[in-house]
Amino acid sequence: MKKVVLIFGVSGFVGKYLAAEFQDHGYEVYGCDISVSANIKDSVKYIKCDILDAVQTRQVIYQIKPAYIVNLAAISSVSYSWKKPTETIAVNVEGTVNIFESVRQCNIDPKILIIGSSEEYEKSDIPISENHPLDSQSPYGLSKITQERFSQLYRERYGMKIYCVRSFNHTGVGQSDRFVIPSWCKQAAELSAKKLDGNIVAGNIDISRDFSDVRDIVRAYRMILENEKSGTTYNVGSGNAVKLRDILNFIISLSPCDIGIRIDQNLVRSVDKPMIYCCNKLIKDEIGWQPQYDIFDTVKEIYQDYYNKFEAEHTKLP
């Protein structure tokens, strides 16, 4: 009999990759979200649910009685969290607590995975381990710290099997162009498809970040849930810091057009940390996870996907 996993936020960018990861390893996958996405495979059993609705959330969990629950439903953009801090706290914290309470009230004992972020950590110029102090500088990061605190509380008070990860930046085909790498790839691909010279609009490109392919990230999520150490928080990231300027120059190199860079000061945040990258020794040693994708190969895939779409649109024009 297949093990059942329930993914909240399945319609988001990571959701389709995580659903595929579980399905490829023999799981039966249910997915919840406030709306269904065309990206979701037909094999995912979709149920509409808003995790801010405690009654809906409890009914779904009671109906499915999953062995595994993953909560991907979140406000996941730092910049958006500054614009909508109240919504960020509601979705990321209240929604998570609704899942915990639903599980408790349904008297079931699934493994639950809660997704945290590198944005929880204080500034550092060295690889960040799980023991590094937490000191977020954004509403998003604070919401993830609070989410973790509730996870610890429910583990200790009710003995729930709640797993926490702190994921570093990840990207891939299908990520919203509100995020930096898809935004740059989209801009460059459009110029290329239309055979135009121009500029890519960017913010601070002199910061360094740890970027992973989303397929590496979801594989880590599955492997973490399959182990028994629910009290251990794992960093998930490549372990490498890449300067955004280098990624942007690589994207420009993919285009045959003459493309420059225009810095928009409105996109530069004064609280941006100069460098964030992951010490992933713990997950490698205890789980056996290793990244398999090179981020520059991933960037090329994203660029090519946008280029193919723009090229198809361009050739349709009279």
Image (cartoon, rainbow, N blue to C red):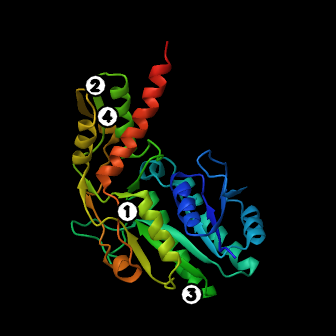
Residue 90 seen by the camera? yes
The amino acid type found where label 1 is placed reads Phe
CA gap, disc 4 and disc 1: 24 Å
The amino acid type found where label 4 is placed reads Val
Disc nearer the start of the sequence (2/3):
3
Which residue is under mark 3? 156
Which residue is under mark 4? 201
CA gap, disc 1 and disc 2: 31 Å
Disc nearer the start of the sequence (4/3):
3
Q: Secondary structure at mark 2?
A: strand
The amino acid type found where label 2 is placed reads Gly
Spot occupied by residue 317 in the image (x, y as percentages of width and height): 49, 16
Label 2–label 4 contact, CB within 8 A: no
| Residue 1, picture quadrant | bottom right
- Mark in the foreground, 2 or 3: 2
CA gap, disc 1 and disc 3: 26 Å
Left or right: where does residue 66 sit relative to residue 306?
Answer: right
Which residue is at the front of the view, 220 or 235?
A: 220
Left or right: where does residue 88 sit relative to residue 27?
Answer: left
Count of picture labels:
4
Spot occupied by residue 158 in the image (x, y as percentages of width and height): 63, 86
Disc nearer the start of the sequence (1/3):
3
Which residue is under mark 1? 168
Which residue is at the front of the view, 142 or 96?
A: 96
Which residue is under mark 2? 198
Label 4–label 1 contact, CB within 8 A: no
- Mark in the foreground, 4 or 3: 4
Q: Label 2 neighbourhood size at 10 Å, few (<14), some (14-19), many (20+)?
A: some
CA gap, disc 2 and disc 4: 10 Å
Q: Secondary structure at mark 4?
A: strand
| Residue shown at 55% from the left, 69% from the top | 25
